[in-house]
Image (cartoon, rainbow, N blue to C red):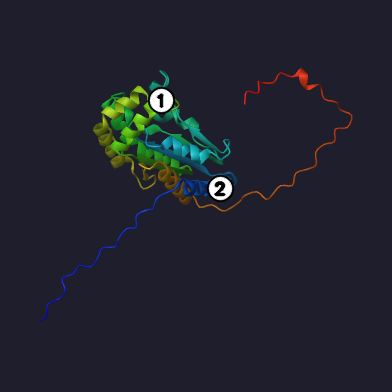
Amino acid sequence: MGNKSSKKKPKEEVEKPGILTKKDYETELARLQVELVKLQEWIKENGLKVVVIFEGRDAAGKGGTIKRITQKLNPRVCRVVALGTPTERETTQWYFQRYVPHLPAAGEMVLFDRSWYNRAGVERVMDFCTDEEYKEFLRSCPEFERMLVRSGIILIKYWFSVSNEEQERRFQARLLDPTKRWKLSPMDLESRARWVEYSRAKDQMFAYTDIKQAAWYVVEADVKKRARLNCIHHLLSMIPYDDHTPEPIELPPRQERGGYIRPPMSDQTFIPEVY
């Protein structure tokens, strides 16, 4: 029996993405934002109720992505919810109670910049909740989300994943930029020191809340521009929609002035023209 070749079948090579230039990024972002407007009109016309949750480590790029999603949209249809620290009264309420008033009505999309998952993240790591409160969250959160889905809400959850090294680079950049320094809170600095604890909390959270009715979708966020495009592209793929862009509008003729004489402009107070 002759010798057979011992060559192994070559593995399929995964094509690595090329360099994303600024021009390519801006062109694709503009295209996706047009699609987001189409999605907005579809949500409004069909009375859909959409909730999109953005979670992840500090400086992972959640805010930048939310900004690009909402940039061209109608704030009456698409709004952002970013709640602050609970008040003394809110701490005595049912945990999910302060989030419920912000849920969408028909024809609305709500983007949560952090959400009820604070309990499974920062509250757990920083000991802002008791062990029993944490365990109750893990038990009740999946049921709460199933209830939302049964009520007709489309619930989409994104986790922005950033490496330790990239988060550190972004923190350092914020220290140098006066317009971004406000983003570095004492809580952010503490999260930097507790990287492993946050990792453990995230893994535990996924184990309980990555459910069939409301799965977690992880966004690789070390490259911000790619993360934005990938997230928007995925969001558009999650809600089937048709192009219901309004037909071109013909502007009516302006009203004739008639005999009306406006008061002199000198009667008004104008701001200084510095530029």
User: Residue placed at 49% from the left, 37% from the top?
Assistant: 67
Q: Which residue is mark 1?
A: 181
**Residue extending furthest left?**
1
Do the residues bearing badges 2 and 1 touch, measured as CB atoms within 8 Å?
no
Q: Is residue 71 left or right of residue 160?
A: right
The crowding category of the residue bearing disc 1, from other C-alpha atoms within 10 Å (few below 14, some 14 to 19, many at least 20), is: some
Residue 266: % across, % down: 77, 19
What numbered label is drawn on residue 34? 2
Q: How many discs mark residues in the rendered view?
A: 2
What numbered label is drawn on residue 244? none
The answer for how far apart the CA atoms under marks 2 and 1 are is: 32 Å
User: Residue placed at 57% from the left, 48% from the top?
Assistant: 38
Secondary structure of the residue carrying tag 2 is helix
Q: Is residue 25 above or below residue 167?
A: below
Query: Can the viewer see residue 100 in this picture?
Result: yes
User: Residue placed at 48% from the left, 32% from the top?
Assistant: 81
Which quarter of the image is occupied by the C terminus? top right
Quadrant of res 91: top left
Residue 19: % across, % down: 40, 50
Q: Is residue 24 above or below residue 106?
A: below
